[in-house]
Image (spheres, rainbow, N blue to C red):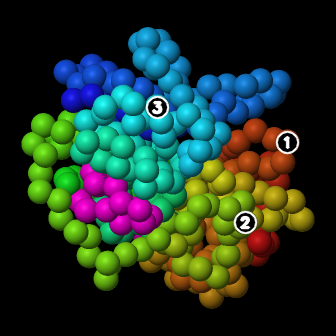
């Protein structure tokens, strides 16, 4: 098949590489424009563009998708299909219908659960036991298209969203290649089971110790690596980089109170601080933080 590939971040690279290594022809790679990165704020191309250039594939990085050269370029290529993986822009009806077989999307959730921009993070934040990858025939709505294939995978008890990004990025390519080969019958999504995965905000990082230990553990893992989780300690922000829940731990202390050892009281159970970081300091083990700061039982965070 003659394919156009839409994708921007590292998550999309394994799928693009699989297509380039397959019998299919990738005629064009489309990604978002270069962005400043690093201390020098030098412009850096998306990883998908770097891979395409290394393989000699034509690229486009349009600032707009409704107007400009993209629609005409796509129509002139006489494509069989377009594959979209974390492109970061909503495709117009004109773009969706430009290829002969339309556009298909590799989405990192078990649709209709977690439609939207941050499905991986929200699956961890919600404490889901499983997640997966869905191959979807794209429609005009937000992740509303019919499902072609899906594959499920468990979420580990200590798995972060960053860990899950890596695993799901590798789960998608073989599923996509199966879809292109088998062209399975599309199945409508069950709109009664829709959940939305909104974009994350920096304020999501703030910890509320009145929540349960299990909920706070999901927050720490779900927001790793960005935006992370943070509380306050002696008037300063304290990043909680890694934690471990102790839901069975019974206490009579107010939420946010240090118990013995590295445990902090939650609304239900306690949270063990495994790795933390103070402003301007390096990340340290929870036990080293308590020793260095001379934290005593009864002191509070938050």
Disc 3 to disc 1, C-alpha distance: 49 Å
Q: Is residue 20 left or right of residue 212?
A: left
| Front residue (pair 165, 67) | 67
Q: Name the spot of residue 248 as percent of width and height, x first.
A: 45, 77
- Label 2 SS: helix
Q: Is residue 202 left or right of residue 108?
A: right
Quick check: 99 above or below 39? Answer: below
> In front: 9, or 218?
9
The magenta region covers 127-147
Mark 2 sits on what residue? Answer: 203
In this figure, which residue is indicated by the disc labeled 1? 280
What residue is rendered at 66% in x and 66% in y? 204
Numbered circle sitting on residue 73: 3
Q: Could you tell me residue 9's position as x and y percent?
A: 52, 37
Q: Secondary structure at mark 1?
A: loop
- How far apart marks 2 and 3 lie (CA) works out to 40 Å
Cα distance between the residues tagged 1 and 2: 20 Å
Q: Earlier in the sequence, mark 2 or mark 3?
A: 3
Q: Is residue 139 magenta?
A: yes
What residue is shown at x 66% (from left), y 30% (from top)? 34
Question: Which residue occupies 45% across, 59% down?
Answer: 119
């Amino acid at each position: 098949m003659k394919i156009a590939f839409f994708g921007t971040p590292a998550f999309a690279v394994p799928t693009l590489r699989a297509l380039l290594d397959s019998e299919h022809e990738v005629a064009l790679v489309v990604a978002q424009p270069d962005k400043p990165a690093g201390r020098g704020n030098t412009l850096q191309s998306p990883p998908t563009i770097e891979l395409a250039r290394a393989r000699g594939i034509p690229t486009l990085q349009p600032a707009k998708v409704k107007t400009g050269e993209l629609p005409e370029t796509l129509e002139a290529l006489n494509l069989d299909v377009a594959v979209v993986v974390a492109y970061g822009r909503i495709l117009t009806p004109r773009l969706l219908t430009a290829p002969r077989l339309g556009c298909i999307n590799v989405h990192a959730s078990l649709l209709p659960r977690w439609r939207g921009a941050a499905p991986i993070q929200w699956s961890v934040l919600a404490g889901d036991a499983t997640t997966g990858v869905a191959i979807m025939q794209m429609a005009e709505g937000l992740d509303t298209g019919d499902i072609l294939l899906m594959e499920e995978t468990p979420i580990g008890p200590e798995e972060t969203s960053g860990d899950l990004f890596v695993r799901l990025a590798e789960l998608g390519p073989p599923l996509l290649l199966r879809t292109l080969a088998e062209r399975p019958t599309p199945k409508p999504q069950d709109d009664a089971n829709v959940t939305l995965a909104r974009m994350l905000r920096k304020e999501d990082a703030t910890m509320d110790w009145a929540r349960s230990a299990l909920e706070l553990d999901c927050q720490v893992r779900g927001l790793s690596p960005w935006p992370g989780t943070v509380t306050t300690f002696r008037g300063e922000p304290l990043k909680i980089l890694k934690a471990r829940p102790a839901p069975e731990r019974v206490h009579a202390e107010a939420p946010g109170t240090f118990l013995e050892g590295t445990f902090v009281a939650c609304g239900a159970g306690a949270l063990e601080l495994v790795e933390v970081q103070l402003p301007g300091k390096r990340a340290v083990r929870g036990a080293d933080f308590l020793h260095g700061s001379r934290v005593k039982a009864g002191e509070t965070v938050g």
